[in-house]
Amino acid sequence: MTAAASPGLPAKMHALVREFIAAPGAVEDAVTEFGSPAHLVFPQVFADNLERLRAVLGARVPGFRICYAHKVNQSRAFVATARAAGIGIDVASAAELDSALKAGFGPERIEVTGPKGEGFVRELLGSGVTINVDNLWELERIAALAQTRVPVLVRVCGFSGTPVSRFGVPLARVDAVLELLAARRDRIDFRGFAFHLDSGEPAERVRAVETCLVLTERAYAAGLSPSVIDIGGGFRQVFTADADAFDAYVHALRESLMGRGEPMTWGGNTFGFHLDDGAVHGTPVFHKYANIVSADRMLADLLDTGLDSQGGRTFAQTVGENLLDVWLEPGKALVDHAGITVGRVEFVKETADGNTLVNLDLSRDAVTPADQEVMVDPILVPARAATGPNSGVVGVFLAGRLCLERDLITNHKVWLPRLPAPGDLVVFPNTAAYHMDLSAARASMHPVPPKLAVARRSGTFSVCRDVDWHEVH
């Protein structure tokens, strides 16, 4: 394809990150000092994301609490930034709890979510943290073991029109929950109902909100005093800088699957599409990359939605009138655009079918969780010593360093401004949300890429090891 015809997937990037990548020598200096590959995190972008969410809540509800979902990224710099900003933290394991405590979070600012075994439940009792209960067994163990009052939220699931979830107490079991809470109010400080939806569909979230408001009324009737509606996380990221370009790429991909135009996938991968009766059908596995609604706008829309069950009053009006606080546990929304991953080109080769492979010194699991495909274009940063001629735009597949066929970093063809050469750097944008940690492995005894923290002070960038970050850096 010519440069004009080459479909692209330009990534949306925070101005600070874009400036760092564009600064002469900045990326290369970082990996020269600390090694390649590497994950780079930007705490100042985290802080910007947080302020946008705070502004939305502050303008609409009298009381709210934001807890950073620690599981989204293990970065110490992100945790330290959250603590310095005065928000809470959501942890889902004993190790994450230890991380939060060592970072300086007091128990009153810690919420524990997710499924918990007997040992973890016992550890939490008497600690002062808020336990977001996942199931009836967990609540029963708290009631049986607690020696002092334990602050508790109860996560519920099974909302109308929402896929079945493995997390939360089914709505059909709420009567048993209310009975236990009322009977053991001497040991359980019930704060309210919670939900968390993986779906970004607004209608599903509205139905969950309305259901939790109804449950809150039932709790009042049972003699309880809930004061919180917890709406969880799951707020979408915005990956693409150009929705039209994304649509054009998907169109070209569908055409290529039909045998029209240049092949664009490795090994016949269809990304969830299927061919039937001469047409391409289905929803691609990378559909999340098509989102263009930011997390703060998504939150504002939810708070401003009129609720049929409340006579048309908005969600924000309803919680305000009933003296309820809104709690949420964003993870992806807080680290959106706050991290990049950098790898170095090791060699370039031609395959038997004529495709071009660019091998990097990292693996697929370093830039994407599980089986997800990264559908934004990486950025080629030529090495300082690069002297070769500019080949012009070229379509390539990026390959990982493991001796496994499946270690293709991109199973879709990526068009770069020129053919990379050994020593060049490739930057993957927006990898802070799960991409860095969720599937990280030490296959072939390769170490997990280190995390580095980047800050800009007085127009100058500085880079340090993530573990050495301090909020006053």
Image (tube, rainbow, N blue to C red):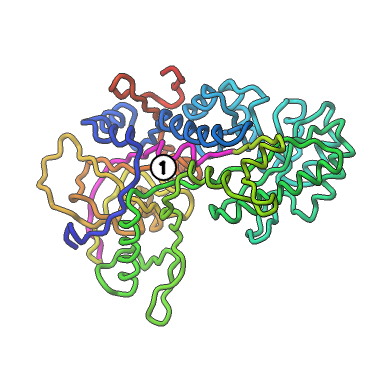
Left or right? Give the position of 272 relative to 225: left
Q: Which residue is mark 1?
A: 431
The segment highlighted magenta reads 329-352
- Is 331 in the magenta? yes
- Is 460 in the magenta? no
**Relative to the observer, which residue lies in front, 240 or 354?**
240
Left or right? Give the position of 132 relative to 44: right
Q: Residues within 10 Å of mark 1 (few under 14, many from 20)?
A: many
Quarter of the picture containing the N terminus is: bottom left
Q: Is residue 11 above or below residue 201?
A: above
Residue at horizontal 46%, vertical 69%? 282
Residue 33 spot, x, y in % from top left = 30, 26
Residue 244 spot, x, y in % from top left = 32, 57
Residue at horizontal 36%, vertical 68%? 268
Residue 19 spot, x, y in % from top left = 28, 33
Would residue 11 be visible to someone looking at this image?
yes
Amino acid type, residue under disc 1 in the picture: Thr
Residue at horizontal 52%, vertical 43%? 300
Q: Is residue 162 above or below residue 332?
A: below
Residue 240 spot, x, y in % from top left = 36, 50
